[in-house]
Amino acid sequence: MGKAGKVLGQVLTSYGISQGKLAEQLGIARSNVHRWVAEIRDPNSETVQGIIAALKVINPDAADEFIGLYTSDLAVGQDALAEASSGAWINPVTGGFERLPDAEGLNVAALSRLFDKTATSYKYVFFLSLLDILRRQNFNIDSPISLRDLLIEILVNAWYPHTYFKLSFGIQDKIAIKLDSLELDLDKPAFDESEKNLLREEISKRNLDSLLVGKDSLMRYVPFRLISPFLSQQLKAYKSQNRGATRNDDLENEIIMALAEQYFDTAKPLYKFDGDSPKSCKSIHLSPEWISYIRINYPIIKGWVSWEWLQYMQSKNPSTPAISNKLFPQLRRGALSSQAKYWQKILEYTDEINCIYSNRPLRADSKLSLDHYLPWSFVAHDQIWNLVPTFSDVNSSKSKIIPASIYFDAFVRVHYLGLQTWKRKMSNDGTWKKFIDSYISDLRLSSKDDLTDFEKLRKAFDSTFQPLTSLATSLGFESGWTY
């Protein structure tokens, strides 16, 4: 009893925020806040979200610390809960379960256990780097991924939090030491996603042999141990047959490598290795089925891994506020010219579309502004299905906040009307296929006919946006905006 209230009391004291100030921001009586802090009554999950939103207004660093402390308590018992719930993970804000999407024939429960009993950052950064490379390669199923490229990407992803904010990766972790040994000096006052290519080039020029192979290499264990959850039964059987044998880490790598090859088509581990031994491995070959799964569910998986890494780094830097803003460099946004032309063309043929927030009519001669329904800084893409036409003043007012659920039906309706209009008037236009492909693949629709079936389209939007919204809220994005 009193878990959230206890954490709230610590945060209010640390940041000098009075109970009255928080009560005023929440629009409630001060006595309610007193009951929480005194651990007489704990706020429910909906109220916790309101507390976070209120703290963000008063002091964003206090909000971040509240999230970090509150979710560190929720993490207790996570292993048992994850195993019992077959691939579920805890939404740290609500305390409820979220689930990585199931897929027939794939062991999603094993995927959800990738980070069990993790004492260093290696697995988190390795998997994040694997996702980044897959996306850059456009999820090409025929391209193996070299361990050297993965190492470079790991160093790139670790460089920003280490260099800019001096975050600790843990006592046992050697990533920071290895980065310092490369003596990278970009001499840049700021760093964003667009500079990653420059950093990759700089790192690739260095001699990385000692980081790839050898007793102290960053790649000695993680590529092998990461996929062990997929081969748990086979590993258990092997260890049972060899009970009493002296534990040998290098031998265990060899066993995992051999099992990944042997059971690649049955147990379906995430990947297998080339080479005859761990020391001779140069690359990994991902399962085509897992590549397809990751491509379809990329935002969810990336958000889940990011959250897991955030949890780990929060535990290693408990007194550092705003950790979530210090792990990932800010991305630069692309132009929305083709998307703007898409909606402009639609408005030339229909007068049924209004701004979903202000209800003002949108017409072809309107000064169109495109809003990312889920914030761009969360999804980091400009896919048409997350964009909705509005007015610039409305868009500026909304900023990076997730809109209240009252707008969701109108959001889906606008996309439905847009797709209907485009199909009726411009289905022979080559750009039609370009835009419908992202709807079909990303919303996991069966066919293009589903695009103009409102119920099927709404169901697809709902099943995609619900988990993404939960993830965004978990990562600290403000929600519930109204115009």
Image (cartoon, grey):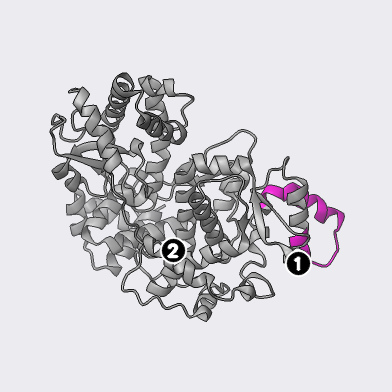
Residue at the image position 36 percent from the left and 20 percent from the top = 452
> Looking at the image, which is closer to me, 58 or 334?
334
Count of number-bearing discs: 2
Q: How far from the left and from the top, in percent, is residue 191?
A: 35, 67
Which residues are the magenta region?
Answer: 229-254
> Looking at the image, which is closer to me, 377 or 467?
377
> Looking at the image, which is closer to me, 339 or 312?
339
Residue 86 belongs to the span the image colors magenta: no
Three-letter residue code for mark 1: Asp
Crowding at dot 2, Cα within 10 Å, few <14 / some 14-19 / many 20+, comes out as few
Dot placed on the residue nearer the N-terminal end, 2 or 1: 2
Q: Quadrant of the C terminus?
A: top left
Q: Main secondary structure of the magenta part?
A: helix
Quadrant hosting residue 239: bottom right
Q: Would residue 166 be seen by someone viewing this image from the given angle?
A: no
Q: Would residue 396 be seen by someone viewing this image from the given angle?
A: yes
Residue 168 disc label = none
Work out whether 70 lies above or below 99. below
Three-letter residue code for mark 2: Asn
Q: Is residue 263 left or right of residue 26?
A: right
Q: How far from the left and from the top, in percent, is residue 311?
A: 46, 59
Residue at the image position 62 percent from the left and 42 percent from the top = 288
> Disc 2 vs disc 1: which is toward the camera?
2
**Labelled pair 2, 1 in contact (Cβ < 8 Å):** no
> Looking at the image, which is closer to me, 442 or 73?
442
Residue at the image position 32 percent from the left and 56 percent from the top = 332
Q: Which residue is mark 1?
A: 250
Q: How far from the left and from the top, in percent, is residue 434?
A: 40, 34
Q: Which residue is mark 2?
A: 197
